[in-house]
Each structure stands twice: as structure tokens, then as C-alpha cells.
Amino acid sequence: MTTIQSEKNDKNPENLKPCCACPDTKKKRDECVFLKGEESCKELIEAHKECLRSYGFKV
């Protein structure tokens, strides 16, 4: 029997998935895109990407 161990990420000790990390920036980004369109929300989109990167996600 083979056991697969997930790689430990010191930046994400709770092992959050990308969908659950950074809920504040995700909410602001999603609301902006819904109301104004993607082109008007580049700063919020980038802020969310930076937050995800801080958890070690490659986006």
C-alpha cells in the first residue's frame, strides 16, 4: 500500500485550498467584477492574487 504525503507548506499551515484562502480579498474582488466588470477591478484582482501567493499558491 502506498501512502501519498502532501507537501508541507509553511506559508499555509492550515492547508487551506485556494477557494477558502483570502476570503476578504475574494469577496471584494467578486463584488467588484459582478458590479463593474473585470476591467474596472484590476487592483482588487491583483490584491487577491498577492494574498493567495502569500499562502504559497502559484497564481
Image (cartoon, grey):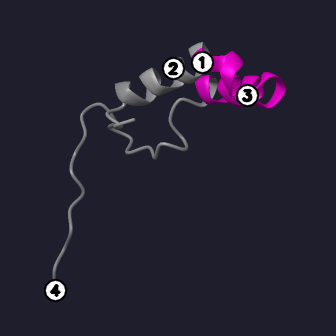
In the drawing, what numbered circle is on residue 21? none
Q: Of the residues tagged 4 and 3, which is closer to the observer?
A: 3
Rounded to the nearest whole Å, what is the CA distance between mark 2 and mark 1? 6 Å
Question: Is 29 contained in the magenta span?
Answer: yes
On the picture, is 58 further left or further right than 5? right
User: Residue 45's x, y, as percent?
Assistant: 57, 23
Task: Identify which residue, 10 or 48, lies in the foreground.
Answer: 48
Rounded to the nearest whole Å, what is the CA distance between mark 4 and mark 1? 47 Å
Are the two marked residues, 2 and 1, in contact with CB atoms closer than 8 angstroms?
A: yes
Task: State which region is magenta.
Answer: 25-42
In the drawing, what numbered circle is on residue 33? 3
Residue located at (66% from left, 25% from top): 29
The residue carrying mark 1 is 42
N-terminal label among 3 and 1: 3
N-terminal label among 4 and 3: 4
The residue carrying mark 2 is 46
Rate crowding at label 4 as few (under 14), some (14 to 19) or many (20 or more) other CA atoms within 10 Å: few
The residue carrying mark 4 is 1
Specify the amino acid type for callout 1. Lys
Rounded to the nearest whole Å, what is the CA distance between mark 4 and mark 2? 43 Å
Q: Residue furthest front?
A: 39
Rounded to the nearest whole Å, what is the CA distance between mark 3 and mark 1? 9 Å
Q: Of the residues tagged 4 and 1, which is closer to the observer?
A: 1
